[in-house]
Each structure stands twice: as structure tokens, then as C-alpha cells.
Amino acid sequence: MKLFASLTSPYARKIRIVLAEKGLPFELVVDSPWEANTRVPELNPLGKVPALITDGGEVFFDSPVVAGYLETLNVSPHLLPHDPLERVRVRQVEALADGVTDAAVTALLESRRPDAQRSDEVIARQMDKIERGLAELERRAAGRTWLHGDAIGLGDIAVGVALAYLDLRFPQYLWRDGHPVLAAFGERMFARASFSETRPPVG
Ligand SMILES: N[C@@H](CCC(=O)N[C@@H](CS)C(=O)NCC(=O)O)C(=O)O
């Protein structure tokens, strides 16, 4: 398998963490879709990472789809439940966490626009999504080790990645304040080898 990823992409990091948790071998192809010589659009018409090429040559993209494919390889730990409704519930947590990441990415891109083009309103709208998303995750994580069931799942990984991305891109945003459950959850996730091995370079 080959994974096309940039080292700072939180979505690609989610997949690298899934691969690490499962101990699946793969070749990491570092390719930033923002660079002129990127090959990503040849694999994913949307021009986004992560994109995965299977050993059979099939391409999968969008991190939830890639994670779903990796689950079909039937390698422990299983990160999605077998029961269809339980699976949807884990996917809901993943979607919520990915949505927090989406809002953070949008806010970051907006904040990097030239002064005259930047919209504080767009940034504030995204920060509201992050606030509401974190409040819901805090509620869901309360009193539990994992967000769903009694073992690590795809939702936990997506939440850990979203929290780490806030630390990376918005170090001044003190999300731990007011979210003690997520703060403790984050520390547990960040201590895992899969997270420390995939820490993005600064910049
Ligand atoms: N929903 C997608 C989001 C992927 C995404 O937006 N990746 C960013 C990197 S963080 C990207 O490749 N952006 C390039 C672009 O939007 O042109 C997923 O979960 O894979």
C-alpha cells in the first residue's frame, strides 16, 4: 500500500495513526497538494490528501473512506464495530471530530489571507463550530475511557487528531480550559506511540 500524504495534514495523520495502531506496513509518499509538482490530482480528482493506493492498485480517498477500506483488511485492533448501528455511532463521532478539524482548517486558511481579503466573520463562524463541537465531544467523553465501547476506535483517533491540530495551528486557543475531560483524553491519546510517531513538523 502507498499512502499519499502531507506531514501536516490532520486527515492524513488520522490514517497514519490507523495504520500504526494496526501495525500495517505501507509506503508513505509525502506529497503536498499545494505544491506545483503534486501528483495528488492524478489519484484524487479533488486534489486532496490522504489518498491510498492499495496493493491491487485501487485508489481510495477521503479519510473516512480510507479508514473504512483499512478495516476490511481484518487486522486487529478493529476500529469500527461489526454491528451496523454501532458502526454508524462511531462514524458520527468521527464526523464530529473531522468537522472540528474542517473548521480549524478553514479558519487557518482564512487567517492567512491578506488583510484586505480576510474576513473576521468567516473566522468567527468557524470558531463557533469548533466551540460547539468541543462542547459536544466533552459531553460524550465524560465518564468514559473511550468515546465508544471499551477499546480504542476510529472516533477516538479522529478526536485526538482534531485536538492535536488545534494545538498545532491555534496554540493561543486554550481549548483545555473548560474542557477538562477532553484535556485528559487528549493527554492519553498523545502519549500513544501512534500519535508521537506521526507528530507533524512545526511550520
Ligand atoms: N474530507 C477530506 C479532507 C481532506 C483535506 O482537506 N485535505 C487537505 C490537507 S489537510 C488537502 O489536501 N487540501 C488541498 C486542497 O484543498 O486543495 C478527508 O477527510 O480526507
Image: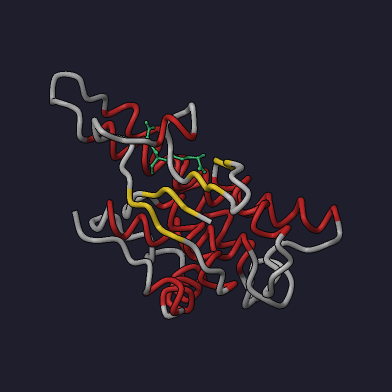
User: Is residue 170 left or right of 116 when viewed as pictured?
Assistant: right
User: Is residue 112 left or right of 134 when viewed as pictured?
Assistant: left
Front-most of residues 108 and 180: 108
Give how far across and how far down residue 24 sits, in percent. Answer: 56, 69
Ligand 1 shows up in which quadrant of the image? Answer: top left
Find residue 174 and report its image quarter: bottom left
Q: Is residue 201 above or below residue 183?
A: above
Front-most of residues 108 and 120: 108
Q: Residue at x 68, y 49 (%)?
A: 92
Front-most of residues 88 and 35: 35
Front-most of residues 2 and 100: 2
Find residue 112 and report its image quarter: top left
User: Is residue 62 left or right of 4 when viewed as pictured?
Assistant: right
Q: Residue at x 44, y 79 (%)?
A: 193
Colour treatment of the image: secondary structure
Q: Residue at x 36, y 41 (%)?
A: 105
Give how far across and how far down residue 146 sits, in percent. Answer: 63, 72
User: Is residue 145 left or right of 86 when viewed as pictured?
Assistant: left
Give how far across and how far down residue 142 sits, in percent. Answer: 61, 70
Q: Is residue 54 above or below residue 23?
A: above
Q: Is residue 186 above or below residue 63?
A: below
**Total numbered circles:** 0
Q: Residue furthest front?
A: 56
Q: Residue furthest left?
A: 115
Q: Residue furthest top?
A: 116
Give how far across and how far down residue 94 sits, in percent. Answer: 61, 53
